[in-house]
Amino acid sequence: MFPGARTADPLVVEDATVRALIDDQFPHLADLELGRRYTLEDHFAIRIGDHHGALFPRFAHDDALFRRAADVIAPHIDRWGFPVSAPIETGLPGRGFPFHWSLVDWVSASTAAFVPLHAASARDLGAALRAIHEPAPADAPANPRTAAGLASLVDDWERLLVFASLRGAPENRVLDVEATDALFRTGVDTRVDVPPAWTHGRLEPRSIQSDRGRFAGVLIWHNFGAGDPAADLGGAATVVPLEMRDELYAGYGEVSAATAWRAQSYQLLASMRHIELDDPFLARMAWERLIELGLAHEA
């Protein structure tokens, strides 16, 4: 077993192993310095020189996604008119590391988790989503985060809602559990009225890039596949204040009422997940969205 790996915990990988994997499999990058490591709950990213990076999964169940990512996304990149830090090559298991991994183009910018988007950027973000959401063919691989549907996520929602209610809102506020649950279930009960589209599946403050408040690109593409575009719209809404949502949709184009309801539910689910992670930047944005919706009241 890889040193430090345990079946129930995310994999921990030493920089020396990362260096060896890159040098073995991408020798043209061997002379480039490794930069800062960015660790998320399911993967970590590390910069390679000025123009490349690598993403490594931390759990076995994501291996198949990383194995397919570069091949699935390759036909789409050239048609997108926004910066994309997407997989361009697939790294193989080796040096004791048991999973596939991705070499990516590196886009130098902050994320919206650290530098929130300006109001003028909401339209650009919406246009990027529209470009992503091309119709998916019947044989397209499923996006594990957007294809299953809201009904399959109810158990997770109920657990997260309890957690958030017990955690408590900032500024001496209280989460209105009943109203929040009712709003989520409106989306659950709303039919999917659009055909499957290509979807990102991980839109959130850490995957949407910001250059001093301007929309600057999209990261974290290993879930890319067919699913409900409402999931991406809901993810994007976690970084866009409610007063900017009309601009988001204006950039995106027509959004049906049913899709908007489902997107709202996906946003609520994403907010609860961010609260559970307890990252201060993510939690702050999550509570801001809930307060804007009137779901977290003063005690």
Image: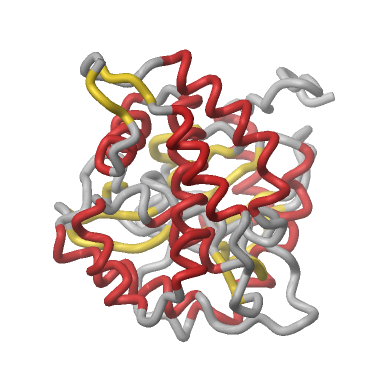
- Counting from the top left corner in percent of width and height, residue 129 is at 42, 71
Q: Is residue 67 left or right of residue 12?
A: right
Q: Residue at x 14, y 65 (%)?
A: 120
Q: Quadrant of residue 6?
A: top right
- Counting from the top left corner in percent of width and height, residue 11 is at 68, 27
Q: Is residue 38 left or right of residue 126?
A: right
Q: Residue at x 59, y 78 (%)?
A: 194
Q: Quadrant of residue 9?
A: top right
125 up-or-down from 53: above or below: below
Q: Residue at x 49, y 26 (%)?
A: 277
- Counting from the top left corner in percent of width and height, residue 35 is at 39, 39
Q: Is residue 38 visible to the viewer in this orientation of the structure?
A: no
Q: Is residue 165 visible to the viewer in this orientation of the structure?
A: yes
- Counting from the top left corner in percent of width and height, residue 217 is at 34, 63
Q: Quadrant of residue 291?
A: top left
Between residue 8 and residue 146, name the one nearer to us: 146
Between residue 115 and residue 108, name the one nearer to us: 115
Quarter that holds the C terminus: top left
By what rule are the colours in the image chosen? secondary structure
2 up-or-down from 143: above or below: above
